Image: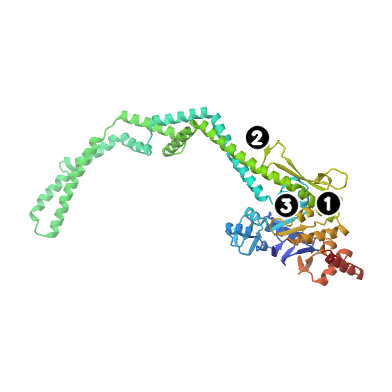
Amino acid sequence: MLTCLRIRDLAVISELELELSDGLHVITGETGAGKSILIAALQLILGGRAHASLIRHGASQAVVEAIFDLARQPALRERLQAFGADADDEVVVRRVIRPSGRSRAYINGTLATGTQLAALTGDLVDICSQHEHHRLAQASSHLGYLDAFAGLDAAATEVEEHFARWSEQLGELEQARARLQDRADREAMLRFHLQEVDALKPRAGELDELESSRQRLVHAERLAEGAWQAHHVLSESDRAVAGELVNLQRQLSSRTGLDPELDALMERLEQLIVDAEDLASEFGSYHASLEHDPVALAQMDDRIDSLRTLVRKHGGTLELVLARVDDMRTELQSLEDADGAVERLEERVSQAASALLTVARTLSDARRGAANSLGGLITTQLGDLGMGNALVRVRVQDLPASHHKLIDDVPVRATGMDHVEFLIAPNPGEPPKPLHRVASGGELSRSLLAVKRVLAEHGPRGLYVFDEVDTGVGGRIALAIGAKLQEVARHHQVLCISHQAQVAAFADHHIHVHKQVDDGRTHTAARVLAPEERTAELARMMGGDTLTPATLQAARDLLGQAVTTA
């Protein structure tokens, strides 16, 4: 139930707050006063598309906030908690529109996307607008009405899940069959690549090692020359470093023992002699290891070229190539087992199809069993709404084979195997025909109200919004519509925008919307009318702005008639 709606800087509304409770709320006002903005605000709360044009001129942003009581909607409370929005008995939904056209949505302070907002608030408000009048004429919407009436939403969800599982496995099977069809070519290509790699037998890091070794071979003569020079200076020349250090040690040896500090320096000198001799030896060994080998260099170049060609062919690095080789071996193994994989998938698809048909047939039987009851109840409701000669039939047929997937020659889709359509015969003796062929705008409005009345005792106890459902009617029929709206309000909170005094008379709460000018700016205001104000508003709706004793008395009579009818 909606308990509060607050709007700021949305279209002609600068600031407006409505407090709502149980029962039937009727909103009236002159054309253009801003009643439709209330519907636009609710649609934003439900995740509707936001536009920068909705922002009031001169404002930096538009804000819509709504507070809903969840006391009678435990399932929704659980969904909100799963989403991460703390929800006890109330939920606060906030939508902010910025001049860029982008918007932000918050559920109990938690940021939400438009898709999340629509999914989480879908059960809170049911808006029955002129758009839905037209939607009712489309057979695609009728199946949902039948499922809601018969309490088959859970069964329909089960069918949808089975259909998704079967479709996914069927897709896997089709891919496996395609791989099987192209298997020979693919296997040949994979074997070619693997043989090429196996012939080279590359190792991770090998390319870096080879390039480093190649540098040594290419510059072997220069490196050898430097190593020999170092060895010569350290140990072979007339004044070799190692020999000079030995001579210095001999000269100072007679002074050892005279001063501890000199003794420590002599120890370091001795270590320096050892290091010089070792270094000279290592330079000699390094010189001996260096050899200019054109044959080895050519072989190394060939190896490097082969590895680089392999990397260019497969992309990335040598290490990535080796990883892809593992993937190719795995794929080749799976291709070799493709026949078995297809057989296993065929078995899984067959089992999924059988399970889908079982739940779809069960759902279809339940729909066919409920169709006559729904058609009869809608017919009764239409009789109350001045269409006593109308006959409504809910037809459930098998889906046409074209444009649908077949299981054992049975057409099936995510909603099951049924095509549901409401048919109406407005006059006796005429065969029932689809709504869109025979129903006028007024008849569609009354048909929609009849459907909503039938469904009022089913589904979550949210807010029903009727936007000018009384279009194209008046007098006795408008009274019947008002009475029917009040019946719906016994099961749901109802908000109705109306131009008919006969409908407004049934309101538990009468909200008047009007324009006013403050400081040269026009804005929309709304308030709940007191009883005496309500009589005046009904009189105005019936007789124009000039109130007379006759129109005021007619308004009182109308209120009395509404109370008597209720």
Which three-letter amino acid code belongs to the residue tagged 3?
A: Phe
Residue that carries the numbered disc 3 in the rendered image: 149
The residue under label 2 is: 408
> What secondary structure is marked by label 1?
helix
Q: Quadrant of residue 241?
A: top left
- For the residues carrying marks 2 and 1, which lies nearer the camera in this image? 2
| Scheme by which the image is coloured | rainbow
Foreground mark, 1 or 3, reads 3
How far from the left and from the top, in percent, is residue 271?
17, 50
Q: CA distance from mark 3 to mark 2?
A: 30 Å
Density class for disc 1 (Cα within 10 Å; few <14, some 14-19, many ≥20) is: many
**Mark 1–mark 3 distance (CA, rounded to whole Å):** 21 Å
Amino acid type at image mark 2: Asp
Query: Measuring 15% from the left and 50% from the top, which residue is drawn there?
Result: 270
Q: Residue 251, percent across and down? A: 10, 51
Front one among 294 and 145? 145
Q: Is residue 180 left or right of residue 376?
A: left
Residue with the most extreme left position: 254
